[in-house]
Amino acid sequence: MENTMINNKIDELRALEMQIALLGKQAEAIKNELKGELDSRKVDSVDTGLHKVFYTVYEKASIDSAKLKAEGLYEKFCKSSLVTQFKITDKKCPA
């Protein structure tokens, strides 16, 4: 693949990523609208017949990694794994 083709693919990828970000914002706005509706009804779920939507508060347990690190336990139970990375960076264009 020629460098020009790679540049074109990167431009295409970036345009798609911008569309995905915009769609994500639109989806988040719809979620917030639905949450607001449940709040205004003062309920934590609604069954529409086609869908059931939930908006509830619950307690979630999580690991306090900072405390484990402070006590020297984090490193004892930490494991390594191989990962791959794909990254695109832009060069600064001369002015």
Image (tube, grey):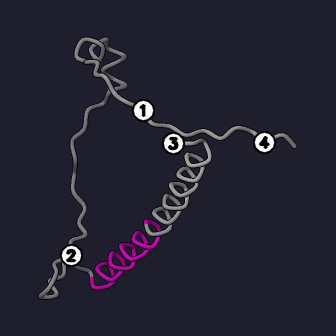
Out of 53 and 23, give the one closest to the viewer.
23
Q: Earlier in the sequence, mark 2 or mark 1?
A: 2
Query: Marks 3 and 1, how far apart in space?
Result: 21 Å
Disc 2 or disc 1, which is closer to the eye?
Answer: 1
Residue type, numbered disc 4: Cys
Return the residue at label 3: 1
Name the spot of residue 65 as percent of width and height, x first.
32, 27
Q: Are marks 2 and 3 in contact (CB under 8 Å)?
A: no
N-terminal of the pair, mark 3 or mark 1, is 3
Compute the Cα span from label 1 to label 4. Answer: 25 Å
Q: Residue furthest front?
A: 2
| The disc label shown at residue 85, or none | 1
Which quadrant holds residue 55? Answer: bottom left
Q: Earlier in the sequence, mark 2 or mark 3?
A: 3
| Pair 3/4: label in front | 3
Mark 4–mark 2 distance (CA, rounded to whole Å): 49 Å
Q: Are marks 1 and 4 in contact (CB under 8 Å)?
A: no
Residue 40's tag is: none
The label on residue 53 is 2
In front: label 4 or label 2: 4
Specify which label sits upstream in the sequence, 4 or 2: 2
Mark 3 and 1 residues: CB-CB less than 8 Å, in contact? Answer: no
Kind of residue at disc 3: Met
Depth check: 5 or 22 in front? 5
Label 2 residue SS: strand
Along the viewing direction, whichever of 3 and 28 lies nearer the viewer: 3
Q: CA distance from mark 2 to mark 1?
A: 37 Å
At a point 53% along the width and 58% down the height, the residue shown is 12
Q: Main secondary structure of the magenta part?
A: helix
Q: Which residue is mark 4?
A: 93
Is residue 29 found inside the magenta-colored segment of the image?
yes
